[in-house]
Amino acid sequence: MAAVRFAREHGLTVAVRGGGHSFPGYSVCDGGLMIDLSPMKGVRVDPDARTARVQAGVLIGELDRETQEFGLAVPAGIVTHTGVAGLTLGGGLGWLMPKYGLTIDQLLSVDVVTAGGEFVKASAGENADLFWGVRGGGGNFGVVTEFEFRLNPLGPTVLAGPIFWPMAESPRVLRFYREWIADAPDELMTAVVHRKAPPLPFIPTELHGELVVAVVSCWAGAVDEGERVLRPLRRFGSPVLDLCRPKPFLAHQAMFDPSYPHGWWYYMRACDVVELTDDVIDITVDHAMRIRSPRTAFPIWQVGGAAARVGRDDTAFEGRVTGHTFNITAATDGPDGFDEEREWVRDFWTALSPFHTGVYVNFLMDEGEDRVRQAYGPAKYDRLRALKRRYDPDNVFRLNQNIPPTTR
């Protein structure tokens, strides 16, 4: 509260840092004031009520560690060093989405410091308009300092991991995958990843650097039933490596960490598509075959299940009825080769443009107001602008995927 008031009194730009996972760099600013929430690490689990109170500096790996002590979980993210705050405020995709919904679907209340430096609470029964906005509208309406989540039973063991095929089999794998997940139970969450096989200890050396396609699964149910559901995938084509096995949920959550370390150079463009049509698959394979950097890997996330059954207008988040989310991400160790990788991302994204239906706001770079509007659709965007006028009429919190306040 004091920091926000100080910034306003001195006309300073305000940046808010939670986990520091902002790809566009919105967590920091030059010549302004960064409110760093990262020391706020409190997690309080109530296993009887199945709730958790989580401060805004907590990372999802830290949250998972506390909740899994009681066989409980919040569906949240896919990289353990992601901040709970930013992930949640944008919606929150993750490995438990079909079973339990988005991260925001577990949110019971928030503590917020407004642009005026005042403390308010928001929930379904208190400041309900603000509660609607923070569930998908990002950090536009204040600094959320604490979250209260509903917890869900899970694990501690899940059946999870990737199954790899040579990239040449990607057209057939994607067409099979499209049919296989059509009637998938809610316990199954999947993502398809194209990349060069990384030189990790659990990957045979003969595969290192080879172009591969992987279907990564997480089965949030009884392992025996998961084995039955996954059997057709295991038997399809000629897999070169099967790492899908029973493991602690905490281990699965950390699986992508080596692919997104701090310090690399990243560039991404994202889009939602309704389905993996033959044309979408052909475009995907064509560009996947052109991957050059051993750091580049792009996931295609399955969306649906419980997340799609929440009312479309119940939260600010849009995209519940999309079929898949493309997160086309390029990465290099440093500036060498980065320009070429960035152009590859842009070309890929442009080729998919006839099939775009929206975009997940947490996957946006610094792409301008039109793209932010696209993330919410016209009606929700107008509603969010009106809400912004009520809670932040001077647009103090503008270092984000910004929603400017209405002018009337």
Image (spheres, helix red, strand yellow):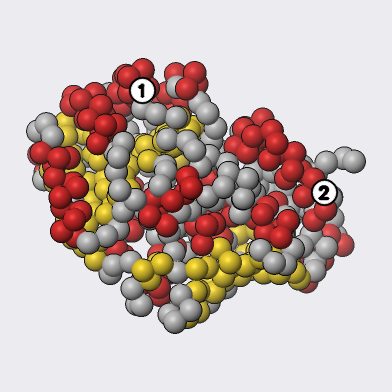
Q: In which quadrant of the rendered image does the C terminus lie?
A: top right
Q: Does residue 70 sit above or below 117 in this rendering?
A: below
Left or right, 378 with reference to 62:
right
Q: Which residue is found at the position 29% from the left and 31% from the top?
A: 178
- Residue 341 coordinates in the image, percent (x, y): 41, 29
- Residue 234 coordinates in the image, percent (x, y): 13, 42
Q: CA distance from mark 1 to mark 2?
A: 41 Å
Left or right, 374 with reference to 284:
right
Q: Which residue is found at the position 31% from the left and 36% from the top?
A: 182
Q: What residue sits right under mark 2 in the picture?
A: 389
Q: In which quadrant of the rendered image does the N terminus lie?
A: bottom right
| Amino acid, disc 1 | Thr
Left or right, 211 with reference to 317:
left
Q: Residues within 10 Å of mark 1 (few under 14, many from 20)?
A: some
Whether residue 268 is visible, yes or no, is: no
Examine the image and state in which quarter residue 175 appears.
Answer: top left
| Amino acid, disc 2 | Arg
Q: What residue sits right under mark 1 in the picture?
A: 277
- Residue 26 coordinates in the image, percent (x, y): 62, 49
Q: Element type at marker 2?
A: helix
- Residue 173 coordinates in the image, percent (x, y): 21, 30
Q: Which residue is found at the position 44% from the left and 18% from the top?
A: 351
Whether residue 46 is visible, yes or no, is: yes
